[in-house]
Image: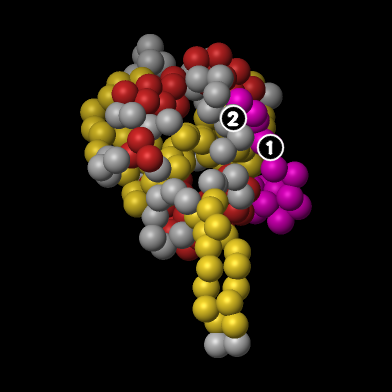
Amino acid sequence: MTTGKTFVSKHPLLQDKIGRLRCKNTSVADFRRLVGEITMLLGYEVLAEMKIEKSEVHTPLGLWQGHKAAQELTIVSILRAGLGMSNGFMALEPMARFAHIGVYRNEDTLEPVRYYARFPANIDRHCVILTDPMLATGGSAIEALDILKNEGAKDIAFVCIIAAKEGVGKVHKVHPEVPIFIGSLDEKLSDKGYILPGLGDAGDRMFGTV
């Protein structure tokens, strides 16, 4: 996987879906569906850089010589909002493993607080995709990447739907080798650390807890 880069999608279909996702009048059901569809489009981009190896397949008419994925794939969701991105990756690769990291942001200090982590065995050999719809201050992403590296993960990418420039800069400063795949890049954060214009709290909108 290519390291140390930031990829911001310019795909018109994805941008259209993100526009509908941002709208305050989008229903919970439509919000969930859009998150899955956007994730699938972003997942196509990040998985294009998976390691491959030569493969042979016997078709009904002959021998096909091509390639297959050389790594197992693990999708790691930052709870809780990251759960909403799982369906998009399941549609792309049903054989993927799914892991979870529980990190929440202290609303007073804006610092991440870890409360849960569960991973498959041999994650050091896997292609690991860390997911969270929003990359705001960067604290939760940095904490989650620290946890993954401590577990031995080496080939890691981070995927989010909307990011703030400040958060992207902080993640790259601490984890410069980790590529970040973004649906839309916003300019700034509010005083409370929310992305502007953003879309509000992704977890609340996804699970109907507004």
Q: Amino acid at mark 1?
A: Val
CA gap between label 2 and label 1 equals 15 Å
Q: Is residue 43 visible?
A: no
Local SS, label 2: loop
Q: Is residue 92 left or right of residue 102?
A: right
| Residue 151 place in picture, x, y as percent | 30, 29
Q: Which mark is residue 69?
A: none
Residue at 47% x, 34% y is: 156
Q: Which residues are magenta?
A: 4-21
Q: Quarter of the image containing the C terminus?
A: top left
Q: Quarter of the image containing the N terminus?
A: top right
Local SS, label 1: strand
Q: Is residue 46 visible?
A: yes
- From the viewer's side, name the closer residue of 97 and 192: 97
| Residue 153 place in picture, x, y as percent | 38, 32
Residue 104 colored magenta? no
| Residue 49 place in picture, x, y as percent | 59, 45
Contact? badges 2 and 1 (CB < 8 Å)? no
Q: Residues within 10 Å of mark 1 (few under 14, many from 20)?
A: some
Q: Is residue 80 above or below residue 166?
A: below
| Residue 70 place in picture, x, y as percent | 47, 51
Residue at 56% x, 19% y is: 176
Q: Is residue 137 above or below residue 123?
A: above
Task: Name which quarter of the figure residue 95 lies in.
Answer: bottom left
Residue 9 colored magenta? yes
- From the viewer's side, name the closer residue of 29 and 69: 69
Q: Which mark is residue 3?
A: 2
> Which residue is the site of mark 1?
8
Residue at 68% x, 24% y is: 187
Residue at 28% x, 25% y is: 114
Q: Amino acid at mark 2?
A: Thr
Q: Nearer the viewer, mark 2 or mark 1?
A: 2
